[in-house]
Image: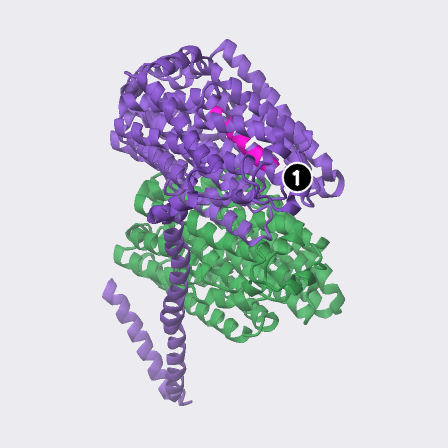
Chain colours: A purple, B green
Amino acid sequence: MEYLWIIPFSPLIAFIIIGLFGYKFLKEPLSGIVAVVAVAISAVASVIGFIQIATEGGYYNLKLYTWMPLGDYEISVSILWDPLSALMTCVVTVISTFIFIFATGYMKGEPSYPRFFAYLSLFVFMMLMLTLSDNLIQLFFGWEGVGLASYLLIGFYHHKNSAADAAFESFITNRVGDWLFLTGAILAFVTFGTMDYLDIFNKLPEASYWVITAIALLLFGGAVGKSAQIGLHIWLPNAMEGPTPVSALIHAATMVAAGVYMVARLMPIFAASDIALDVVLFVGVASAFIAATMGLVQNDIKRIIAYSTMSQLGYMFAAEGLGLFGEGMFHLASHAVFKALLFLAAGSVLIGIHHILNVQKMGQLRKYMPITAATFLIGALALAGIPPFAGFFSKDPIIEGAYEISKLAWFFLWAGALLTAFYIFRLYFLAFENGDRLDPHVKEHVHESPPSMTVPLVVLASGAVVLGFFKEFFGNFLKPSLNPEYMSFLSEETKRLVEDGLSRAHHVHMAEDAWHFLLHSLTSPLGILSLITALLGIFVAWVIYQLKKVDAKEIAKTFRPLYLLLYNRWYFDFVYYAIFVYGYYRFSKILWFIGDKIIIDGIVDGSAKVSLLTGSGLRLFQSGRIGGYVAQMALGILIFLGIFLLFM
Amino acid sequence: MTVEFVNATFPVITVSIIIPLLFAGVLFFLPERHAKPLSIIASVIVFVISTYMLFAYDYSTYAIQFYEKYNWIPYLGVSYEVGVDALSLTMVWLTALCFVVAFVWSTNIQKRIKEYFIAFLVLEAACIGVFVSWDLVWFYIFWEAMLIPMFLIIGIWGYAERIYAATKFFIYTFFGSLFLLIGVVGMYIYQFMEKGVLSTSYFDLLNLGLPFKLEVIFFLLLALGFAIKVPMWPFHTWLPAAHVQAPTAGSVILAAVLLKMGTYGFVRFSLPWFPEASKYFVPVMFTLGVIAIIYTAMMAIAQTHIKRLIAYSSVSHMGFVTIGTFALNMNGMNGAIITMISHGLTSAALFLAAGYIYERVHSYEIKDLGGLAKFMPVFATLFMISAMASAGLPGLSGFVGEFLSLLGTFEVSKTTAVLAGLSLIVGAGYTLWLYHKAMFKEGELPKSKIERWEKLRDMNTAELLSFLPLVILMFVIGLYPTWWVRLIETTSAAILSKFIGG
C-alpha cells in the first residue's frame, strides 16, 4: 500500500508546477490538463486502494515523516487507509476529476485560467491531507488548508467587491470554528498524551465523561464552521461568489462535508458522550430545517442550491447524532454526486445565459439546453428523495431512523424533506420550464454547453441514478470503520463504551439491501408517507410555478412577516454583521482612541511634559558650587543605602 | 545549575561582531558608491558565519558553545565573555538574516547613503552583541549602543514626524534600560555584600540565592526594561509611532530583531535568575499577554495606516511569546522561542511588503489602496504567504510557535489558552483585512486611479531576493519544525531547569 502517498501528492505537484510555470509556459489549456491528469492519477490510485481494502479488509497506517515532536509523542504526517477514509478519498478524487474536466470548459477564455487550476489542485491536496490523516493536527492542517483554498477561490474574482467580501467573511467565520477545534485538539492532547486517533480511541475509557464531552463538543464546533451549520452558516451562501465549479466541488460536494467526515472519523469520541451526540443531532436537525426554509424564497440559482447543501449536511449530522454513522456517510457520498451534478448543471445554465443568476429571469431553458435540463432534473429528483434515485436511498433511511429514536427530530427532518422537494422543483420549473422571461438579447445566444461540460454532467447523472443500489455494499464496506463490533483497532473496553453510546440506534431495523428497502418503503406507512411528502412538495411547486394556479406573490403578501423572516435569512446575517463586524470594528476604533491615544499616550506624553518642567526646576541644583554637589552625592548614597538596609 | 562550556577553536562570534564594525570604519573613508556593495558583503559574511554556527552547534547536550572569555577589568570582575546556546544562536542567525534582507532592500535608498549604511552596520554589531554577551557590562553596552543608530535611522531617514517618533523611541526605551541597569547593579552589589565576589558574569549572578523579596524587586526592575522593549501592553505605544516613521529597512530590523531583545531578556535573565518571582508573577504575565493578544489585535484593525497596523500586530504576536515563556514548561518555552523566530520572519516580510506598496503607490493609507493583486501577481502571492504565516496557518511558521505556546499555556491555565486562542480569529481578522483592502478589493476607488496602476511593475530582482528567503524559511519552519524543536529543546530544558527539575 506504499503507493498511497501518490494520492495527496499528485495534486500538490500539479499545484507547484502550475503555480511556477502556469502563466509563463503552460497557459490555457495546458494548465488545466496538468491539473486534470494529476487529480485523475489520484482518483485511479484511490480507487485501486479502495478495491484492495474492500477485498482484503484490514487497515493501513503509513507514517511519512515526523512533523514535530511533543515530548514523547511525535506528530507525524501520515496516511490512515481504512474503509472510511478510502470512501471519502474516493468521493473527493473522483468527483474532483469530473469537476476539473468540467472546469476546463467552464473557465475557457478566463485570463487567470492557470491560477484557477493551481488553486483547485491546492484544494484537492489539502482535502486529501484532511481525509487521509491519522491524527488531529494533520487533520487541522488540511482543515485550515481547505479553508485557505476556499478563501482564495471564493475571492477568485477578487477585484469584485462582493467576491472579496465573501472570501473574507468565509475565512473569518471558519476561523471561529477552527478556534474551537484547535482548543479541542489541545484538550485531547493534554488528556490523552497523543493526537493519533487510534490511540485516543483506546484511551477513551481512562478519561472522565465530562472531559470527553468537552473534547467532542469543541471539535464539533469546528465542524459547525466548516460544514456551515446553523450558527456559523452565514458564509456558505455568500461563498457562491466563486466560480461555479468551485461551488460544486468545495461548497457542495467535498469541503463542506469535511465536518461530517470528521465526526464519523472520530466516532468513538462522540459515541462516548451522549450529550455530544444530542448536540450533533440538535444542530443537524435545526440546520436541516432552517436552511430548507431559507431556500424557499431565494431567487439566486446558486444560493438556492447552497441552502440546500446546508440543509442536506444537516441531515448527515442528524444521522450521526442518531447514531446512524453509516447512513450519514452514505448520504454524504450520494449527496456529493447529486449536488455536484446540480451545481454543474447550474454552471452550464450560467454559461448558456451569460451569468444571469436570478431564477425569475430564466424560463424555458429546457428548449435550448436539453442535456443540462435533463441532468438537472435527475439531480433534483435525487435531492427530493424520489426512488430510484440516490437521494432516496440515502436520505430516507435517516428520516425513518429518526422516527424510531426521536419523534421530534423526525418531524423536523420530515418537514425539511417536504420543503426540499418544493424549493428544488420551484427552481426547476422557474428555470427550465414555464414562463418566457428570458431577456430577448440573451435568448439569441442561449446554447447548450460543449462536451467538456455535458459529459461530466451525464456521468454524474448516471451516478445519481445507480448509486443508491449500492446501499448494502457501502453499509457493509464501512462496518470496519463505523461499527464497533467490526472495528479491529479498538480495545475491548473502548468497544463496550462505543456500543453503549450507539445503543440509541440499536432498535432501528432497516433493510440494508436497496431492493428490500425500496419494497419496504412502498409498503410501510412511514415509507409511503415520506414518498407522498416528496411528491407533494413537487406537486405544490408544479401548481404554483408551472400551472400558475396560485400566485407566489400573493402568498408572500399574505404571510408577509414570515416571508420577510425567510427572505432575510432569519436575520442571522443582519445581527452578526451588526455585532461582530460593525460592532467590533467601531468598538476597536473607540477603544483605540480612548485606550491608546488618550489614556496610555496621555500618561506617556504627559510624563514627558512633567519631566520637562521638573528639568527646568532641577536646573537650580546645577549651581556649579562644589559644596552643593558633594551634599547631593552624599544624600544620594544615603538614600541608596537606606533602601538596601530596608530589605536586608 | 552548572553550565558546560565549549571553547571556540576560532573566535567566530567576535569576528561576526567585528566585521560589521570594521566595514563601517572602512566605509567611513571610502566614496559613497562603495557603501551598498560593501555593506551587503559584510552582512552576507556574518550570515554565512552564523549559518555555519547553526549547523555546527551540538544540540545533544546543553553547553555554551563557541565560548570565548578574556579578562578586561579584573578588579571589578568585568571580562569579555561571549558564547551561544540555541536561544542566542537562533537570535543571532535571525539578526544576520534580517540585516542581509534589510541591506538588499536598501539598494534603492537615495539620501545620505554612506551614513545610512554605517548606521546599519553599527546596529548589526550591537544587535549581535546583545545576544551573545554573557558579561553584563558588555550586554548593557550593546543594549544601549543599539539605541543610537536606531535613533538616527528613524530620525534622519524616516517620514514626516520622524523627530517625535525617534525621540519617543529613544527616551522610552532608555527609560526602561535605566531600571535594567539599576537592577543589575543592585545584584552586583548584593553579590559583593553576600559572597564577597565581584563579577559581572551572567553565570555568577545565576546562583545568588536571593531572598524572595529581593527577587521580586529585581524581577520588577528588569521586567520593566524588558517589557518596554518587547513591548508589552501598556508600554507599547512607542512602537507604532516608531514604525510609522521609520524607513522600511529600519522597521524590518526594529520588528524582527529589536523586539526580540525584550523577550530574550525575559527568557535569558528573568526566568533563571528569579525563579520564585517568575512563578509569583505568572498570573500577571498571563494577563498582560492575553491583553496584548486581544487588545492590540483590536488596535490593529482600527488602524488606517499599513505600518501602524503591522506594528500593532507585532505587539499581539509578542503576547504569545510572553504567555509561552511564563507557562514555564517545555512546550511553552519551545513555542515562545519558535514564535520569536517566526515573528522575525513574518514581521520583516510584512514591513517589506508595506515598503513595496509605498514605493509604487506612494501612500501608506489603506483607503488609498485596493485591487493591487491584479497588477502584481508575484508580489501578491508572497505577501499572501507572509500574511497567512502571520495569521498562523498550519504549514507555515506562525502556527508552530502559536500552537506550542497555546499547548504549554493550556497545561497551566486553560482560560488563558482559550482566550489567547481567540487570536486565531482576531489575528486573521486584521491580517486578512489589510490584505483584503490593499490587495483584493477595489472598493470605492476611482477608476482612473486603478487604470494608472496597470503600469505598476511587479517585483524586481533586488526585491525578490530580499523577500524570497523569508518566505522560504516560513515554509521550512512550518513544514519541518522537528529540526528546530530538536535544536532548541536542550536549551529550553536548561532555562527551565529551576522549574521542572533536571
**Residue numbers of the magenta segment:** A333-348
Q: Decide which of B192, B395 is in the foreground and name it.
A: B395
User: How many marks are shown on the rendered structure?
Assistant: 1
Label 1 crowd bin: few (<14), some (14–19), many (20+), radius 10 Å? some
Q: Is residue B413 visible?
A: no
Residue B112 is covered by the magenta coloring: no
Residue A347 is covered by the magenta coloring: yes
* SS of the residue under disc 1: loop
Q: Say if A190 sits above or below B226 in the image.
A: above
Q: Decide which of A266, A289 is in the foreground and name it.
A: A289
**Where is residue A329, by image quadrant?**
top left
**Where is residue A34, by image quadrant?**
top right
Q: Position of residue A330 (x, y in %)?
A: 44, 22
Which chain hosts label 1?
A
Q: Main secondary structure of the magenta part?
A: helix
Q: Which residue is mark 1?
A: A446
Q: Decide which of A520, B383 is in the foreground and name it.
A: A520
Indicate the quadrant containing the C terminus of chain B: top left, top right, bottom left or bottom right: top left
